Image (spheres, rainbow, N blue to C red):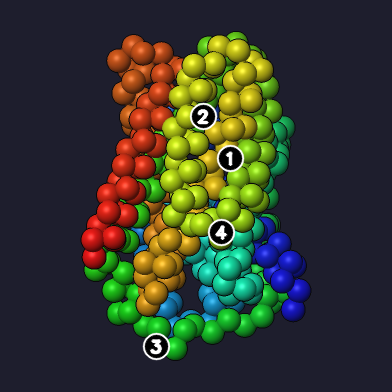
Amino acid sequence: MNTAAAHFVLALGGLFLGTAEFAAMGLLPSIAETYGVDMPTAGHLVSLYAIGVVVGAPLLTVVTARMEKRKLLMGLALLIVVGNAGSALAQSFGMAGVARFVSGLPHGAYYGTAGLVAASLVAPQKRTQAIGHVMLGLAAANVAGVPLVTWMGQVFGWRSAFALVAAGGALLFVLLPLVVSRRHADEGASPLSELSAFGSLQIWLTLATAAIGFGGMFAVYSYITPTLTEITGIAEAYVPWMLALWGLGMVAGNTFGGWLADKALTCSIVGFFAWTVATLALFGAVASSVWLAGAALFLVGIGFALVPALQARLMDAAPRAQSLASAMNHSAFNFSNAIGAWTGGLAISAGFGWASTGFVGAALALAGLVIFAGALMLQRKD
């Protein structure tokens, strides 16, 4: 079996899921017009996807604890097809809401399982790099997937975007058995052993680190379009290009961050958080300059290296429940989406301006670093 080919196909699933998650945000005006609802109501579709992630990650991971991993990934690929095909075909807003919820169900379970499978294909000292290879799919979604489906939505209608993701899920279902070998569940794996992860304080503290600390990125991302158009002064048509810079930073972070984390996991997480604090504050300070804002967004994207690093830490903290711990990592990041959007919105509503989201984001990242430091102190004490 070709490890590189297996990692590539596993990353494709990340590309399709990431595209489905983030593209909906840019398509909301068209969706709202189709169903005759206002923007806040249309925004419920984004929330329903996130709820699907939070529900699906632990539920699907626990009930499939004994399932062979390649078969599980293929089942999750079918859920990608069903959810996004339903989103494309939904004739009412209620049906669209159900479809978006179903679309979110495989998200955390896929990333968690794919990361474990990718890590099992390499030597232990390269596992974080392997997880990073899977997460490159999510980075690629921001570089290419989201701009592509946003353009498709503008030209062919928003339904075509979800139809393309559904087709991607079908392609994933076909490719998985061709390049990924069977990976049986660990001996002794069971729903109860997976649920044991919830009894670990280190698991909860690491999840809190991700949920709060990574919320800083989403504080900026949630309001990036009005920030760039109102403060930076660029036309809305150029926003995708600025987001592509962010995505390129994510690619760089996954590539080099995984290597660093494999060398020194704890020090890397601390360093990535410090980097994120600094770069988010930098964006808040230079948002009025096109060139400096673009450079800052690229640097912010590098902080995405936290995702595989925190997943590796969760795997260490839950040796008997690695599947659930890995999947819950992505539930935590969806919580961070809500936390970031909420706190950034509070700052804007209070009159601090669009660029204030950079400083709010830096504060959240700093809070995540403090939580992580507390976890390390407790771990050392134990």
Distance from the alpha carbon under mark 1 to that under mark 3: 38 Å
Q: Position of residue 8 (x, y in %)?
A: 71, 62
Choose the circle earlier in sequence order: 2 or 3.
3
Q: Residues within 10 Å of mark 1 (few under 14, many from 20)?
A: many
Q: Residue at x 32, y 38 (%)?
A: 367
Distance from the alpha carbon under mark 1 to that under mark 2: 9 Å
| Residue 302 numbered mark, or none | 1
Distance from the alpha carbon under mark 2 to that under mark 3: 44 Å
Mark 3 and mark 4 in contact? Answer it, CB < 8 Å: no
Mark 1 and mark 2 in contact? Answer it, CB < 8 Å: yes
Q: Quadrant of the N terminus?
A: bottom right
Front: mark 2 or 3: 2
- Compare residues 32 and 139 and report the one nearer the observer: 139
Mark 2 and mark 3 in contact? Answer it, CB < 8 Å: no
Q: Element at badge 4?
A: helix
Kind of residue at disc 1: Ile
Is any atom of residue 146 visible in this view?
no
Front: mark 1 or 3: 1
| Residue 188 numbered mark, or none | 3
Front: mark 1 or 4: 4
Kind of residue at disc 3: Gly
Mark 1 and mark 4 in contact? Answer it, CB < 8 Å: no
Residue marked by disc 2: 279
Kind of residue at disc 2: Thr
Left or right? Give the position of 139 relative to 101. Answer: right
Q: Residue at x 61, y 56 (%)?
A: 259
| Residue 263 numbered mark, or none | 4
Q: Residue at x 67, y 75 (%)?
A: 180
